Amino acid sequence: MPDLEQALVISNNEVGPSLFEMELAASQTVPLCQPGQFVHLRVSSTHDPLLRRPLSLYDVDKNRGTITLLYKIAGRGTDLLSRTQAGSYIDIMGPLGRPFSFPTAGKTVVLVGGGVGIAPLLYLARQLMEKGYGVKVLYGSQSSRELVALPRFQQLGVEIETAAWDLESGYQGLVTDLLAERISGQNIGFLYTCGPEPMMAKVAEYARRYNLKGELSLEQHMACGVGACLGCARKLADRDSHYVKVCKDGPVFGLDEVEVN
Ligand SMILES: Cc1cc2nc3c(=O)[nH]c(=O)nc-3n(C[C@H](O)[C@H](O)[C@H](O)COP(=O)(O)OP(=O)(O)OC[C@H]3O[C@@H](n4cnc5c(N)ncnc54)[C@H](O)[C@@H]3O)c2cc1C
Ligand code: FES
């Protein structure tokens, strides 16, 4: 049985259009957390809605025993979550899922995040920096107002470039075009990506062109979150009728391991 904890909500603030950051004190969960994993949250104190909602570990502070989440209101569950008051408790299960791996190559690693898909890449960037990797982040969004994670990456000291159609400084367009036009595949040791699936499909295509290895993180509908219900099955890319469970076998997969559309 995965770990459950009643986590104290330290803060829950709107940081952009329909975007919220929630900080939780979760001292039992925190020591187990690895980048790419997620917590499965009960979004209300009742059993309605019944199903938990999965959110990535955006940041983890092992000294303070805290987890930060970045989430976008997508429907009823996340709307309820956005109304949670500081000082209340929230039921979390986790950390769940397969984390990102760390490559052995010495070259720069590149992280490509789109929209709220940037969430699992911040804690990843922190750990990569601590382990001495050269880290470059490409961060795209529909509009510059949604680039809410930028200050946190800047605080970390990583090299970061942004992409949005309305940017005055930065790349005006898609983050995948920024990757293709400005970044030479020869200089990349490993690629990580999370965001809308068409974006991740383009990153995987770029990786194939340069013969690069990398990983993506899927945001798939989930129910149980622990491999028991088949609610999150996803087809493997190269084998007919072979499915994986995103909650347990993922959410992190190799760039060409699963079909992304
Ligand atoms: C491993 C994992 C990590 C995630 N991390 C984050 C994160 O850090 N921040 C964040 O904002 N979101 C994240 N998500 C997505 C988040 O879980 C969903 O947005 C949330 O569960 C929606 O719940 P809801 O009740 O608000 O919306 P619902 O009412 O359940 O759905 C609202 C709309 O979104 C669609 N939808 C719901 N869930 C998904 C989904 N998983 N994929 C595609 N479409 C969906 C529904 O079809 C519907 O149209 C993650 C998902 C997974 C699987
Ligand atoms: S959500 Fe139940 S098996 Fe993945």
Image: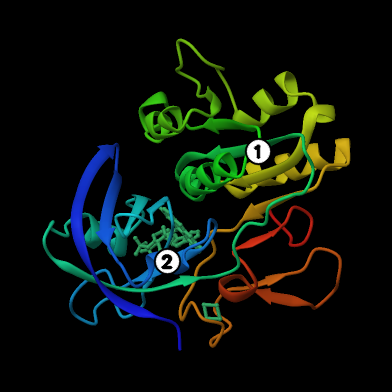
Dividing the image into four quarters, tell me where ligand 1 lies. bottom left
Q: Quadrant of residue 179?
A: top right
Q: Which residue carries the number 1 mark?
A: 133
Q: Amino acid at mark 2?
A: Pro
87 sits to left or right of 49 = left
**Residue 2 point in image, percent of width and height:** 45, 83
Q: Residue at x 48, y 32 (%)?
A: 141
Between disc 2 and disc 1, whose residue precedes? 2
- Compared with residue 8, is residue 50 higher up or lower down, i.e. above or below? below
- Compared with residue 218, is residue 177 higher up or lower down, i.e. above or below? above
Out of 232 and 23, give the one closest to the viewer: 23
Q: Residue at x 54, y 79 (%)?
A: 231
Rounded to the nearest whole Å, what is the CA distance between mark 2 and mark 1? 22 Å
- Compared with residue 144, is residue 97 higher up or lower down, i.e. above or below? below
**Residue 52 point in image, percent of width and height:** 36, 74
Q: Which residue carries the number 2 mark?
A: 31
Out of 143 and 13, give the one closest to the viewer: 13
Out of 117 and 79, give the one closest to the viewer: 117
132 sits to left or right of 221 = right
**Residue 75 point in image, percent of width and height:** 33, 59
Q: Quadrant of the N terminus?
A: bottom left
Circle 2: element type: helix
* CB under 8 Å between discs 2 and 1: no
Q: Quadrant of residue 259?
A: bottom right
Q: State the residue lying farthest toward the top.
A: 168
**Residue 107 point in image, percent of width and height:** 76, 34
Circle 1: element type: loop
Q: Residue at x 31, y 60 (%)?
A: 65
Please, which colouring scheme is shown? rainbow
Dot 2: within a 10 Å radius of its alpha carbon, few (fewer than 14), some, or many (20 or more) residues? some
